[in-house]
Image: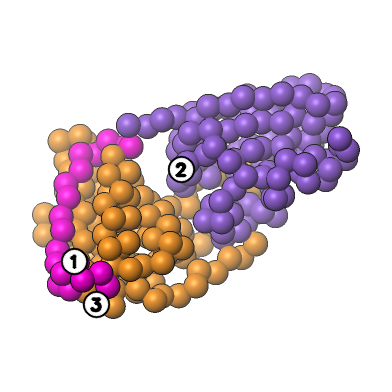
Chain colours: A orange, B purple
């Protein structure tokens, strides 16, 4: 870890529920993870997972209510980065199962439903817990020297 | 803040070459039939992703709709210019079973049967 980065620092940003602003969280994650010494591939995985978690909080948590914010908290430690994405809505349940591309294409089903799948594939741990504000928090854990992401293609 | 998706296309014989730029972040931003040509003469499209900066799950949903429409026509969908991160994500989703990735435009066109 870069010596300029505190080993137990916490950084919090608050984002209105407006699509496009998830890039603010992604940019912050890039700076923080780079300062922590995280390799590029890990940072890119985190960026995409955080994008999906933030959009999920805007859409399913806050129902795109621009008066409600998404709170993104980065918790730094020596071996990992914990990112907590919290909405201010009424809570939601993550989807069950894994989306099946063949079914979506051949069966003419909705082509949506990849956000949660990508989060689970790209970071070391994904957990859903109730947030302090009554909504939902998604906890993304990325180890500094973490797993190599897999593909099914 | 959203840059949106820009599309520039040209045709070479039976292949339509489509340069995508900006962000692919909305499943309904561009109708799939705007990306895929109505012409019966076109047998393949080559998507150039080299100027695409950001793709999210809604963008993936749009690309799946493109692939689905291409299979109905049928038109082969080839691609190049993806960075390693998005190529990995396409693999994870399974898109690379339907959208074939090549190192550059030349190899994609050769795969489409077009020798220049």
Q: In the rendered structure, are the residues bearing label 3 and label 1 in contact, judged by CB atoms less than 8 Å apart?
A: no
Which residue is disc 3 drawn over?
Answer: A78
Q: Position of residue B83 (x, y in %)?
A: 56, 51
Residue at screen point 46% across, 59% down? A117
Q: Position of residue B96 (x, y in %)?
A: 66, 53
Labels 3 and 1 within one chain: yes
Does residue A145 lie above or below B61 as drawn?
below
Distance from Cα at disc 2 to Cα at disc 1: 29 Å
Near-viewer residue (A7 or A151): A7
Q: Position of residue A62 (x, y in %)?
A: 23, 43
- Where are the magenta residues, as a range? A1-20
Which numbered disc, 2 or 3, marks the residue closer to the eye?
3
> Badge 1 sits on which subunit?
A
Q: Indicate which disc residue A47 carries.
A: none
Q: Is residue B54 magenta?
A: no
Horizontal relation, residue B90 to residue A16: left or right:
right
Horizontal relation, residue A108 to residue A114: left or right:
right
Distance from Cα at disc 2 to Cα at disc 3: 30 Å
Labels 2 and 3 within one chain: no
Which residue is disc 2 drawn over?
Answer: B54
Mark 3 lies on a secondary structure that is: loop
Q: Quadrant of residue A40?
A: bottom left
Confirm whether residue A92 shows in the render: no
Distance from Cα at disc 3 to Cα at disc 1: 13 Å
């Amino acid at each position: 870890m870069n010596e300029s980065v505190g080993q137990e620092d916490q950084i919090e940003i608050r984002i209105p529920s407006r699509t496009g602003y998830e890039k603010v969280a992604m940019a912050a994650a890039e700076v923080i993870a780079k300062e922590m010494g995280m390799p590029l591939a890990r940072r890119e995985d985190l960026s995409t997972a955080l994008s999906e978690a933030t959009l999920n909080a805007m859409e399913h948590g806050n129902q795109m209510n621009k008066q409600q914010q998404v709170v993104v908290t980065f918790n730094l430690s020596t071996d990992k980065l914990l990112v907590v994405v919290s909405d201010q809505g009424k809570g939601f349940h993550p989807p069950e199962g894994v989306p099946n591309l063949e079914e979506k294409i051949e069966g003419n089903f909705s082509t949506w439903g990849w956000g949660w799948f990508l989060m689970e594939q790209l970071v070391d741990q994904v957990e859903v817990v109730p947030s302090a504000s009554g909504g939902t928090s998604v906890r993304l854990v990325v180890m500094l020297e973490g797993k190599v992401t897999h593909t099914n293609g | 803040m959203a840059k949106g998706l820009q599309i520039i296309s040209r045709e070479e014989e039976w292949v339509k070459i489509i340069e995508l730029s900006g962000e692919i972040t909305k499943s309904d931003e561009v109708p799939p039939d705007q990306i895929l040509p109505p012409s019966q003469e076109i047998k393949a499209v080559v998507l150039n992703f080299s100027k695409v900066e950001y793709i999210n799950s809604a963008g993936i949903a749009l690309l799946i709709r493109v692939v689905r429409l291409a299979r109905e026509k049928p038109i082969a969908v080839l691609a190049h210019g993806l960075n390693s991160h998005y190529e990995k994500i396409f693999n994870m989703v399974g898109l690379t079973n339907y959208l074939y990735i090549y190192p550059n435009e030349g190899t994609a066109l050769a795969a489409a049967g077009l020798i220049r």
